[in-house]
Image (cartoon, rainbow, N blue to C red):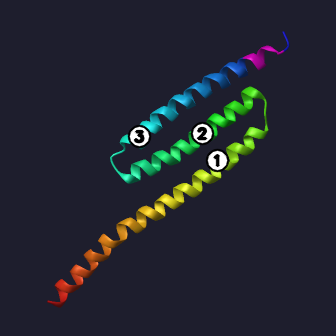
Amino acid sequence: MSGSWSDMVLAVCVSIAAFVVAASIVCVLLRVLIGPSRADRVVALDLLAICIVGLVACLAMIDDVPALLDVALAVSVLGFLATVGFARYLERADEPSAARTLDSTATDREA
């Protein structure tokens, strides 16, 4: 037996964590597909990026490959930038309707 008892317990716990994170990725993908609004989908995509980072970290521990942590870092930065980009898109997509509402109230006051 090459590993100690604590190494085996750690390997089992990390494997269970990887399975739970993979199951949560499936649930989050369902939310992305059937989300009732665009904002729900953006939040689900942000959670998907977080789950992928967790899964990659678990795989780095299971396979004992520290280079995978660099991949996790890159995915986290890209996930953050994507969330900011989607939030800006949603903000701009809602802007014309807000501008029309402000214009209509201004013309109502003038009349």
Up/down of 54 relative to 2, above or below: below
| Number of on-image labels | 3
Amino acid type at mark 1: Val
Relative depth, front residue between 93 and 7: 93
Q: Which residue is mark 1?
A: 75
Q: Residue at x 53, y 42 (%)?
A: 48
Q: Specify few, some or many for label 3: CA neighbours under 10 Å numbering under 14, 14-19, or 20 or more.
A: some
Q: Residue at x 46, y 49 (%)?
A: 43
**In terms of sequence position, does the residue under pointer 3 or pointer 1 come before the other?**
3
Specify the quadrant of the image occupied by residue 63: top right
Residue 31, numbered circle: 3
> Magenta segment, principal secondary structure?
helix
First-in-chain label (2 vs 1):
2
Residue 12 at x, y = what percent?
Answer: 67, 19
Asked if marks 2 and 1 touch (Cβ < 8 Å), the reply is: yes
Q: Which residues are magenta?
A: 3-8
Q: Position of residue 95 (x, y in %)?
A: 36, 71
Mark 1 secondary-structure assignment: helix
- Horizontal placement of 80 versus 57: left or right? left
What residue lies at 36% left-to-right and 41% top-to-bottom?
34
Residue shown at 23% from the left, 84% from the top: 106
- Residue 93 in the image: x percent, y percent? 38, 66
Task: Check the picture and name the quadrant holding the N terminus.
Answer: top right
Indicate which disc residue 52 carries.
Answer: 2
Kind of residue at disc 3:
Arg
Quadrant of the rendering where the C terminus is positioned: bottom left
Label 3–label 1 contact, CB within 8 A: no
Q: What is the residue that sits farthest to the left in this orientation?
A: 111
Q: Tag 2's secondary structure?
A: helix
